[in-house]
């Protein structure tokens, strides 16, 4: 059996735990006590400091483990991940503050993102006595409430409802509405009563808001069943309702980034990211636990336009790398109840603590089962296929994905339109080795739970689409040599918003001229050696995220759908290898696209 480290951490960290107790754990994690000017007065019947802890975008991470690499997780920032580490921090805060003075919240994206999450959604789906590992871990840690994230809907509403039933705390989403009734499909909010010895209790309202992009990204799972109006619109309705229900303090858990931005284009009238706007526009909010954007906000204050009051925003880093710690100083007035005097927040680093052995013992068996699954052999490969250079060079790794997608689409459609396929370089660390190939080797190429669509596009539409994809590159003045990192990710564009196109029965070839401005970079677009005509029709394999409008690529969301059997692309790749027993890159790999500058091949240095 694979052993979860369980008590990872340097000897220094262990000494801090043993010698300093909870205070030592918090100090090692980066906790900074309030300054003298910000420190609360001595607690009495009329004063109280509440601590609210927050996580977000856990994405199926229980342990500090990289299932694709088959080793402990590590990255360039030396971060650790997982609820087992978060649990150690939470217990230290509760010990140091008193459990009755601490609430624990999450801002969504919980049940998708790792092979552990996939396994208990698709291989051995939860239900009956089979409890989702994330539910078991969060129950053991003692969460008080969690907002729904958009990725909660990836496996369909029935599985989400099973997960919800297994939780000891409510899932909240004031803007996830039943399509038939228009009423909330989940609890909009919860009131948590914090009891105090010798003083009046504090009533904390927690409002959950999810992302309206669910209607686009998971259209196949939610269309006709749920609708997702904007966060701002629903907050205007529900924050007053939470106050009327008796909340002394209102905290919003919002699965929406802080600053206005969107990958949805004009597909929805609501922004994807708008937590700061909600804080500005809706009176009555004291703090927002931000999610979705995968960014770290230790502390940020936004002024509400109506009241002039400061609203606190915090977002801990994703996957359990950080834990937000928010402190609210409150004062009791006999005729006015509890009033907020001051608030502050910071983030604690989970890489400073060991994993909680309680969580390790609870879920070791689930983890071991998934490790065995992802390491099981599915076939062999004649030559190594790496994703390291796939974002700037035509590689066998992306050719493999495009080949399998296109072959499945042609199998579904039969003879007719020529078949093309689109794929993104999701994982720079992915590599299928020469020799034996495991599930995790193949799955590492495709780290998202997307399903396969087929759509009809014309030559003109394909060129427009590729022009949008080519905006991923910085503009240059000559062929180089150029450092790859200086050419890619223009304006912060992530790798998953760069697509490459390939043909199945004949090559689809093109140049990307990055000396030209965005919108006029695609040159020499040809199919089977002949220039692609503007009205030439193609069947194009694409994932559901793109087809639903994710990334705001032109034409794709409105294109006629030719294929949608809800087949997961990652599983198609695994089954393709298992059925054939061997991957031969020479059978499908060729150089179909290249980067050029003024027509000259780009040189990398």
Image (cartoon, helix red, strand yellow):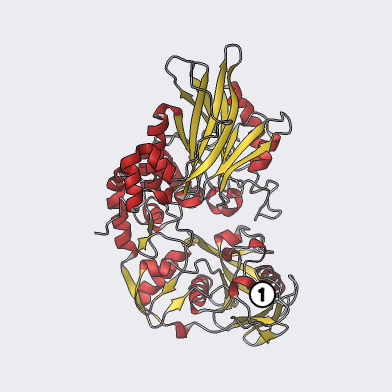
Tell me the SS state at disc 1: strand
Q: Quadrant of the N terminus?
A: bottom left
Q: Which residue extends farthest bottom?
A: 529
Pointer 1 residue: 537
Q: Is residue 73 left or right of residue 330?
A: left
| Percent of width and height locating residue 544 | 55, 60
Residue in the picture at 35% in, 52% down: 9
Q: Which residue extends farthest left?
A: 1
Labels in figure, total: 1
Residue 270, compared with residue 522, is above or below; it is: above
| Percent of width and height locating residue 197 | 42, 17
Q: Is residue 65 left or right of residue 145?
A: left
Q: Quadrant of the C terminus?
A: bottom right
Residue in the picture at 64% in, 38% down: 301
Residue 168, compared with residue 80, is above or below; it is: above
| Percent of width and height locating residue 505 | 55, 82
> Toward the viewer: 7 or 599?
7
Disc 1 crowd rating (10 Å Cα; few below 14, some 14-19, many 20+) is some
Q: Is residue 575 left or right of residue 264?
A: left
> Toward the viewer: 404 or 325?
325
Q: Which residue extends farthest top?
A: 335
Residue 195 shows in the view: yes
Residue 230 shows in the view: no
Residue 593, compared with residue 336, is above or below; it is: below
Residue 170, compared with residue 576, is above or below; it is: above
| Percent of width and height locating residue 503 | 57, 79
Q: Is residue 522 left or right of residue 350?
A: right
Residue in the picture at 70% in, 34% down: 304
């Amino acid at each position: 059996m694979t052993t979860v480290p369980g008590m990872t951490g340097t000897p220094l960290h262990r000494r801090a735990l043993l010698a300093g107790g909870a205070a030592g754990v918090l100090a090692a994690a980066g906790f900074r006590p309030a300054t003298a000017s910000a420190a609360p007065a001595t607690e009495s019947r009329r004063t109280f400091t509440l601590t609210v802890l927050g996580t977000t975008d856990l994405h199926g991470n229980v342990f500090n483990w990289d299932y694709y690499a088959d080793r402990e997780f590590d990255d360039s920032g030396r971060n650790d991940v997982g609820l087992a580490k978060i649990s150690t921090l939470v217990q230290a805060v509760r010990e140091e503050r008193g459990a009755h003075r601490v609430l624990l919240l999450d801002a969504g994206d919980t049940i998708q993102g790792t092979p552990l999450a996939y396994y208990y959604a698709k291989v051995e789906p939860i239900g009956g006595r089979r409890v989702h590992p994330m539910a078991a871990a969060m129950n053991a840690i003692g969460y008080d409430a969690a907002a729904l994230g958009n990725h909660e809907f990836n496996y369909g509403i029935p599985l989400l409802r099973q997960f919800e039933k297994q939780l000891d705390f409510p899932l909240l989403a004031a803007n996830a509405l039943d399509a038939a009734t228009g009423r909330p499909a989940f609890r909009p909010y919860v009131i948590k009563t914090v009891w105090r010895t010798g003083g009046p209790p504090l009533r904390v309202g927690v409002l959950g808001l999810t992302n309206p992009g669910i209607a686009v990204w998971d259209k196949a799972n939610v269309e006709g069943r749920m609708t997702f109006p904007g966060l701002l619109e629903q907050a205007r309705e529900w924050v007053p309702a939470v106050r009327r229900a008796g909340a002394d303090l209102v905290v919003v858990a919002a699965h929406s980034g802080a600053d206005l931005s969107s990958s949805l284009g004009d597909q929805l009238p609501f922004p994807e990211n708008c937590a700061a706007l909600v804080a500005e526009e809706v009176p009555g909010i004291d703090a927002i636990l931000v999610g979705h954007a995968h960014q770290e906000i230790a502390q940020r204050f936004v002024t509400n336009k109506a009241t002039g009051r400061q609203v606190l925003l915090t977002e801990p880093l994703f996957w359990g790398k950080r834990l937000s710690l928010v402190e609210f100083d409150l004062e009791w007035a006999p005729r006015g109840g509890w009033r907020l005097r001051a608030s502050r927040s910071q983030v604690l680093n989970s890489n400073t603590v060991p994993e909680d052995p309680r969580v390790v013992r609870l879920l070791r068996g689930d983890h071991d089962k998934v490790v065995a699954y992802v390491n099981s052999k599915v076939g062999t490969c004649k030559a190594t296929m790496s994703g390291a250079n796939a974002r700037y060079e035509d590689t066998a790794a992306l050719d493999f994905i495009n080949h399998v997608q296109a072959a499945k689409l042609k199998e579904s459609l039969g003879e007719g339109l020529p078949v093309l396929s689109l794929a993104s370089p999701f994982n720079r660390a992915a590599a299928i080795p020469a020799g034996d190939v495991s599930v995790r080797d193949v799955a590492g190429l495709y780290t998202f739970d997307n399903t396969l669509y087929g759509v009809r596009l014309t030559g003109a539409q394909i060129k427009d689409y590729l022009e949008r994809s080519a905006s991923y590159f910085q503009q240059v003045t000559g062929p180089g040599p150029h450092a790859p990192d200086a050419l890619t990710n223009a304006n912060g564009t992530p790798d998953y918003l760069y697509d490459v196109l390939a043909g199945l029965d004949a090559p689809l070839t093109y140049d990307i001229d990055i000396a030209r401005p965005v919108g006029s970079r695609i040159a020499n677009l040809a199919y089977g050696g002949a220039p692609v005509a503007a009205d030439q029709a193609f069947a194009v394999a694409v994932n559901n995220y793109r087809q639903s409008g994710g990334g705001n690529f032109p034409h794709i969301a409105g294109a006629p759908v030719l294929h949608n059997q809800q087949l997961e692309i990652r599983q198609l790749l695994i089954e393709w290898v298992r059925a054939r027993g061997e991957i031969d890159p020479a059978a499908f790999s060729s150089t179909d696209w290249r980067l050029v500058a003024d027509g000259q091949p780009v040189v990398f240095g």
